[in-house]
Image (cartoon, rainbow, N blue to C red):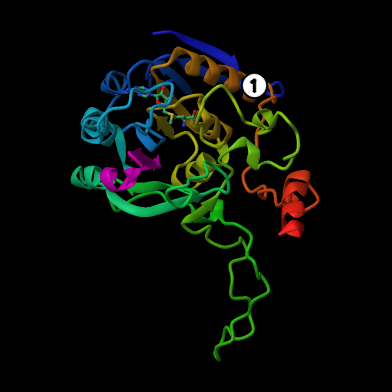
Amino acid sequence: MKIEKRPYSLFSDEEKIIADEYNESADIVFALGDARETLAKCPSGFASLIITSPPYNVGKEYETQTRLEHYLELLDPILKELVRVLSPHGSLCWQVGNYVDASEVYPLDIYFYSLFKKMGLHLRNRIIWTFEHGLHCSLRFSGRYETMLWFTKTDEYTFNLDSVRVPSKYPGKTNFRPGPQYGLPSGNPLGKNPSDVWRFMAKEWETGLWNIPNVKANHPEKTIHPCQFPIELVERCVLALTAEGEWVLDPFSGVGSALLAAVRHNRRAMGCDREPKYIEEAKRRMEMLFSGELPYRPLGKPVYQPTGREKVSQIPQQWLIGEKGA
Ligand SMILES: C[S@@+](CC[C@H](N)C(=O)[O-])C[C@H]1O[C@@H](n2cnc3c(N)ncnc32)[C@H](O)[C@@H]1O
């Protein structure tokens, strides 16, 4: 096993212990290899939060598309290992979209729900992650959400709602029912529950500068990976579902977005991916986090709303001419 120490920040003496496989004293683990083999070397119950977006079987550069049943069979042993390494007080957040075959849609969360339920997990929320942009479909409505199933292993689980409250729309609302609370504020001064519908940017072109030609480079977190997590989506789960010093595990960690979210909030982080280039990119991003240079979209930053003055917000001249001529 390779272990090294890295200074955590330019402004403190704190060091992080980085390993390439699970180690009790490590702070961060970047494990290169197959998830099943990597998990087999981890102790039962170590992970307080498992958060991941598995391959969807849609033919991305890192996967070979196969029949849905076969894809689920391949993942089954990994799911069993995940349930084993999950702490009795822990949570598993499983983020997926659709598998599409011959234009027929198979929502993957439906399949994974039954698999995890059979393994004894309890569903707490089916979170809708909605975004405004993506492929434009012509044979069905364009898909604009994916889901994240939040399971716990038992009924005794961590849920720090206060750490993830969001500003109330009407903080000045008061109790109107007669009684001792009448006229007093009815909300929570820390804000409201963020609900089970989350709106985080999914793609780089959802940022503000729509009229820049190289929009692909426009999302502050964009890397070489074709479908990475926004860090803020993971941050909300890390804050709500774990305590400082606990382990956050992403068994399909790609370029390490979940690890970055965990480390930013003083949790220990373990990621596994079988593609060396993603592991290298994850390490590079971690170094950038340490040096304060990680491009990052902070949790809670409002999603950009076009003003109507951007070139791309305006009706093309050709269409206006068409209208006049019609
Ligand atoms: C949807 S991506 C995850 C992206 C990640 N959430 C991020 O923010 O970068 C799925 C990842 O799983 C990896 N992968 C697929 N099958 C794997 C396996 N059996 N073991 C380990 N990694 C695997 C792929 O290389 C890919 O990076």
Q: Position of residue 160 (x, y in %)?
A: 48, 52
Magenta region: which residues?
A: 91-112
- Prevailing SS of the magenta stretch: strand
Question: Left or right of 93: which side holds 312?
Answer: right
Q: Residue furthest front?
A: 325
User: From the viewer's perspective, is residue 89 above or below residue 260?
Assistant: below
Q: Position of residue 77 (x, y in %)?
A: 22, 29
Q: Quadrant of the N terminus?
A: top left
Considering the numbered disc 1 on the image, is that residue within a helix, a strand or a loop? helix
Of 40 and 75, nearer the camera is 75
What residue lies at 28% left-to-right and 51% top-to-bottom?
A: 122
Quadrant of the displayed image that contains ligand 1: top left
Above/below status of 49 relative to 43: below
Residue 4: give x, y in percent of width and height. 51, 10
Is 88 covered by the magenta stretch?
Answer: no
User: Where is residue 238 drawn, in percent x and y?
Assistant: 49, 41
Q: Is residue 280 left or right of residue 71?
A: right
Q: Residue at horizontal 41%, vertical 35%?
A: 53
Say which of 309 and 4 sits in front.
Answer: 309
Quick check: 310 left or right of 279? Answer: right
When the figure is inspected, residue 281 is found, relative to residue 230, above or below; the finding is: above
> In the image, what residue type sits under mark 1?
Met
Residue 90 visible (yes or no): no
Figure quadrant of the C terminus? bottom right
Pick the front one: 277 or 307: 307
**Quadrant in which residue 261 is drawn:** top right
Residue at the image point whose x is 41% and y is 30% from the top: 250
**Residue identified by numbered label 1:** 288
